[in-house]
Amino acid sequence: MSSYDVIVIGAGPGGYVCAIRCAQLGLTVAVVEGRATLGGTCLNIGCIPSKALLHASHMLHESHENFAKMGLNAAVTVDWPQMQAYKNDVVAQNTKGIEFLFKKNKVDWIKGWASIPAPGQVRVGAEVHAAKAIVIATGSEASVLPGVTVDEQVIVTSTGALELGAIPASVAVIGAGVIGLELGSVYARLGAKVTVIEYLDAITPGMDGEVQKTFKRMLEKQGMTFVMGAAVQGADRTEAGATVRYKLRKDDSDHALAADIVLVATGRRAFTSGLGLEGLGVQMTPRGQVTTDAHWQTSLKGLYAIGDAIAGPMLAHKAEDEGMAVAEVIAGKHGHVNYGVIPGVIYTHPEVANVGATEEQLKEQGRNYKVGKFSFMGNGRAKAQFAGDGFVKILADKDTDRILGCHIVGPQAGDLIHEVCVAMEFGASAQDLAMTCHAHPTVSEAVREAALACGDGAIHA
């Protein structure tokens, strides 16, 4: 029986980051992963391949919409097999990079699927390995609605949507969250007629209300259609593709939508099956996630859990933060994650990013707050890039001026949000941000202008 200080189950962003940090802290580490490549859902069938397709399809959109305006005259067509090859190459570069990091940091990769037969033990195949600490980092899997049978060919999750054999003429997307909107926008740019069916009355549940409305209008201008307040009853394969059946909540009327491809994007659920947690008496939440304490330890001493397997936003960077923090805890140090400063990003065009509280949350709390808002139409760099739609909105405490949240819809929002994250991490005021020099011309000046708008007013508004 081989023995380690730490065995991490799962090699996704949370798992591999945790393992590397443990090794850096002087611990002996192994990672159990059953996939043929490292990186988990994110690198193999999630974040990375979807961003490759988002980038490629955005380049196509630019060629059709803006190239001629800039004096660039070219007939750009789509070679779908080559686009898939490009995506696969991006994935391969990233997953091989994790292998290199494991070798560099002397992290052992135990290939196979893990179970935990007893405290301090991990079984992989016929072998049992011992560990002083075990970290569950098994991630999540796609949630599926009753009455919808996924075959990953016609009725697909995000996994199948990344591997379609051809660009469909029409796509029905069930769910207006991050995954549905990102992949829906990919195929809309590639020429498909995309219809998004959402149960709620607003897209991107939980985001700032003003962002939701503005973002939806932008996507509609790009050709996407939305059916809101619709409860999906089922989806059936047909000779021509599939049909989605749904009821409109406002009048309980029945409707059907035919499409070549149906993308089920109704969220994700923790993936812990096969670990044997029930037999160990590990406490779980009603939603099937592993219950942990403030140090990410489960109800079983020496067994920890992070990432999508536990409560909180299902985000790769949240898992990474928890992976580093739990490594510090296991090594006898202090691990910390500031859950109030975890950004969220939707990588469509324009991008959407947020951190901290929304206006709706602050109103519910009865918080005395102020709003500083600046449109990208007032930003010279954004206008030069045909990206003047959208805005930056900063929320600050009305009495102390401390930044409470930020919401951006516009160019490079996923990058711009991080200076606000740093400011919030250090308890900065909107004035602190407003008085910090920003290079000109950059789209980041819009963040400074929004901070200025929290005070005496933006300059270019």
Image: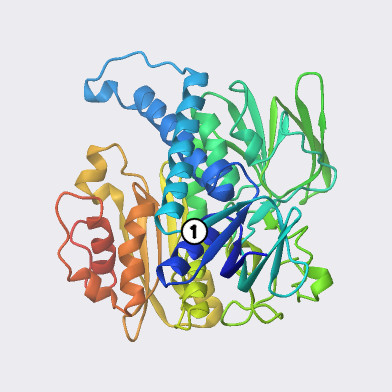
Instruction: Where is residue 302? Give x, y as percent.
Output: 64, 78
Instruction: Where is residue 229? Give x, y as percent.
Output: 71, 50
Judge whether 339 appears above or below 350 on screen: below
Residue 197 appearing in the image: yes
Instruction: Where is residue 96? Give x, y as percent.
Output: 46, 42
Instruction: Where is residue 132? Give x, y as percent.
Output: 61, 76
Q: Secondary structure at mark 1?
A: loop
Please report the residue visible at 44 percent of the width from the left and 61 percent of the height from the top: 354
Residue hosting label 1: 107
Please report the residue visible at 23 percent of the width from the left and 75 percent of the height from the top: 431
Q: Quadrant of residue 308?
A: bottom right
Please report the residue visible at 81 percent of the width from the left and 76 percent of the height from the top: 281
Q: Is residue 454 left or right of residue 197?
A: left
183 vs 196, nearest the viewer: 183
Which quarter shows the N terminus? bottom right
Q: Crowding at label 1, few (<14), some or many (≥20) Cα neighbours within 10 Å?
A: many
